[in-house]
Image: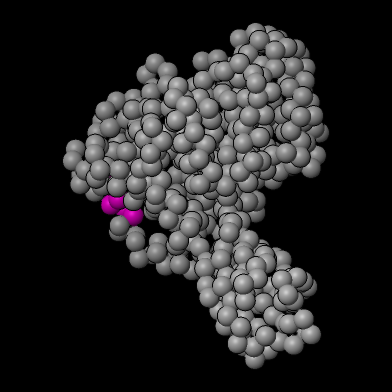
Amino acid sequence: MTIAEFRAACMEKFDAASHELNARAKTNIEKYRKGERTLRLIDKDGKPLSGARVKVTQKTHDFKYGANIFLLDEFESADTNRRYREQFAQYFNLATVPFYWEGTEPDEGVLRYDKNSNKIYRRPAPDLCVEYCEQNGILPKLHCLFYDKFIPNWLPKTDSAAMWRLYEKRFAEIAERYAGKMYEFEVSNEMISTYKWKKCSILSYERDATLRMWQMARKYFPNETLVINDTYPPDVGREGYYSPYYLMIENLLRRGATIDKVGVQNHIFCGCRASQEEDLPRYMKFFDPELNLRGLEVLSSFGKPLEITEVTIPTLGEGEDAELLQAEILRTLYTMWFATPLMETVAYWNLADFTAYAEPGHDENKCRAGLFHHDMTPKAAAKELKRLFEEEWHTDETLVADENGCVCFRGFFGEYDMEIDGERLSFGIHKGQTCFGTYKINNNQNEREDRT
């Protein structure tokens, strides 16, 4: 297939619904991603600074956009490792940190949390990741507590009682070390897909295992944001309120699981099993806006915040035009998600080409779904993601105070800097928080009083 043919196949339904989708995005982004702010400026004597010119610059986004950080210090080249560290901090405000059991305790009793732990590919030590995030103002999220697929070989997988004791030990160890340090904790992951797993424990087949894991998670993480992670929006959209994921969440909630956030994935693994041309029909559901929006609507009915936890967007074809198509698909999907009222987070999956998971018959590297080339130079998709959050969904304004010293504006939720007469101070626009603030400009000594 030519690039034009790939685009026609993938974007046909989005193009046909572009008027409705654009109207939805414009309305919802304005309504759900922005807030109003009034700044009242006074001098040291309390008099309004009428006519003052104020430059307002957005510094951060409340909306979380990130990627997995599985390749932190994992490249053979020191220069590529340096670029990875630099680029991640420039492009994202959230990082998915790997806590797969096979990586945190590969041998019984040998824990790999410390940053100086021995290397395991795509499993950087959690302490290393958390330290990097703290140094760069990035929020780390834990992935994941109960994923019974990537587990170490030493576990007594057929002994239910022993497995429960060991899982509880794992939860307790993680809580002792990381409670209060993570943005959120994914509890259960991909439990709908256990029938596909080649390696798992007896717990994957126990009726109440997922519920018990959620109860255990709340026991050890009483004050943390706990996330459930599974399936794809178009699958939920096709099956609606009778989809396995909806029914699983409903069952868990009715039985007392305290789920704080609902996560869904978006892996378009086109090319991982066959040529991209042969494989594309398998993934056409991801390019159906009606199915995707219906799935998000069904999951929104729980009233919980939503998250796209794992995003894979392939590079279809070869060359610059193929990378431009990847960027167009990214823009289309991210706009749809950003315009979804309860969406709070979107996390991309593999950051660089040829660093993905592979097993016989399933090689995700063939999708070339990275936002960066293998040497960490940005592809068009990375540049587009940066443009969306730093230009299109971003607020920078120069304002003039009225006769009462007030400036009023509407901006995206986040933290801001304000510059006036050479002085700088900070404020925020956040959902549900104060919308009026009085600021005293006093010989570079800034004071403020916020009120609703």
Front residue of 95 and 186:
95
- Classify residue 373 by image quadrant: top left
Front residue of 290 and 266:
266
277 is higher (above) or lower (below) than 48: above
Q: Residue at x 71, y 87 (%)?
A: 48
* Rendered-image quadrant of the N terminus: top left
Q: Residue at x 68, y 89 (%)?
A: 404
Q: Is residue 13 magenta?
A: yes
Q: Residue at x 58, y 39 (%)?
A: 95
Q: Is residue 308 visible?
A: no
* Rendered-image quadrant of the C terminus: bottom right
127 is higher (above) or lower (below) than 90: above
- The kind of secondary structure the magenta stretch mainly shows is helix
Q: Position of residue 108 (x, y in %)?
A: 70, 10
Q: Is residue 238 left or right of residue 418?
A: left
Q: Position of residue 408 (x, y in %)?
A: 61, 79
Q: Position of residue 451 (x, y in %)?
A: 77, 73
Q: Is residue 161 magenta?
A: no
- Classify residue 276 by image quadrant: top left
Q: Residue furthest left?
A: 2
What residue range appears in magenta? 10-14
Q: Position of residue 20 (x, y in %)?
A: 39, 64
Image color mode: one colour
Q: Residue at x 63, y 46 (%)?
A: 137
